[in-house]
Image: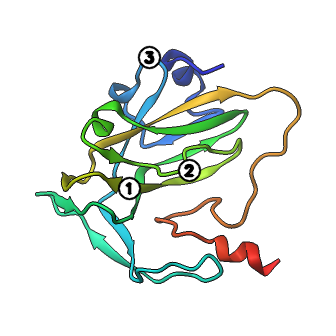
Amino acid sequence: MILSGKEIQRHIGKEIIIEPFDQSRVNPNSYNLTLHNELLVYENHELDMKKLNPTKRITIPEEGLVLEPNRLYLGRTNEFTKTEGFVPMLEGRSSTGRLGLFIHVTAGFGDVGFAGYWTLEIFCIQPIRIYPNAEICQIYYHSIEGDYEPYKSGKYQNNTDIQPSLMYKDFEK
C-alpha cells in the first residue's frame, strides 16, 4: 500500500524524516524533492565495475546549466531523508519526464531504514537547461509487511554528498 500525502504528514518527524520539510511540496501520495546545486560526471568514457571511476564536480549556476544528451550526470537531493517502517521510492515528476529528463536510470527503489541524501542518475533525451533547487523528483512510501532487517549497508547509508557507484566494493568480498 502507498501512503497518502496526509499519511506522510502524520509520520513526519517520527518514522519519516525529510529535512528540510516544506508543507507546500506534499502531493496526494508523494512529496516533491529538490535538486542540489552540484553534479558529478565521470571523467572516463569507458567505466569499469571493478574500479572506483574518477569523477569531476560541476556547479549548477542560478542561471541554469544545459545538460548534454547521452551523458550520465549524478546529482543529489537537497533533502536528507530517513525512513523507518516504510519502503521509500523515488520517481521523476511527470513534468520532468515530459521534458525528456530522467532523474533515476535504475535506482528509484529505496530500502526500509535508509538514511541519507538521494543520489540522482540524471539522463536527458535532448539538451535541457536545469536549475538548482528545482522540484525535480518525488518520494513516496510503501508499507512493509513481515519482519525485516533495516538497511545498514556501509556503501551508501548516512551519506552526505553525491555518491558515485561503489559497486567495485562488491568485488572486494
Residue 107, label in figure = 2
Label 1, residues with CA under 10 Å away: few <14, some 14-19, many ≥20: some
Here the colouring is rainbow
Task: Pick the quarter of the image with the N terminus.
Answer: top right
SS at circle 1: strand
Which callout, 3 or 1, points at the residue further toward the start of the chain?
3
Q: Which residue is mark 3?
A: 28
Identify the residue at horizontal 57%, vertical 80% (top origin): 48
Residue 122, label in figure = 1
Q: Nearer the viewer, mark 3 or mark 1?
A: 1
Residue 125 place in picture, x, y as percent: 28, 51
SS at circle 2: loop
Which callout, 3 or 2, points at the residue further toward the start of the chain?
3
Residue 16 or residue 155, whichever sits in front: 155
For the view shown, which residue lies furthest in the left direction? 63
Q: Is residue 8 above or below residue 93?
A: above
Task: Report whether 147 appears left or right of 18.
Answer: right
CA gap between label 2 and label 1 equals 11 Å
Task: Report whether 69 appears left or right of 18.
Answer: left
Looking at the rendered structure, the kind of residue marked 3 is Pro
Residue 9 place in picture, x, y as percent: 51, 23
Q: Is residue 8 above or below residue 91?
A: above
Identify the residue at horizontal 47%, vertical 83% (top origin): 54
CA gap between label 3 and label 2 equals 23 Å
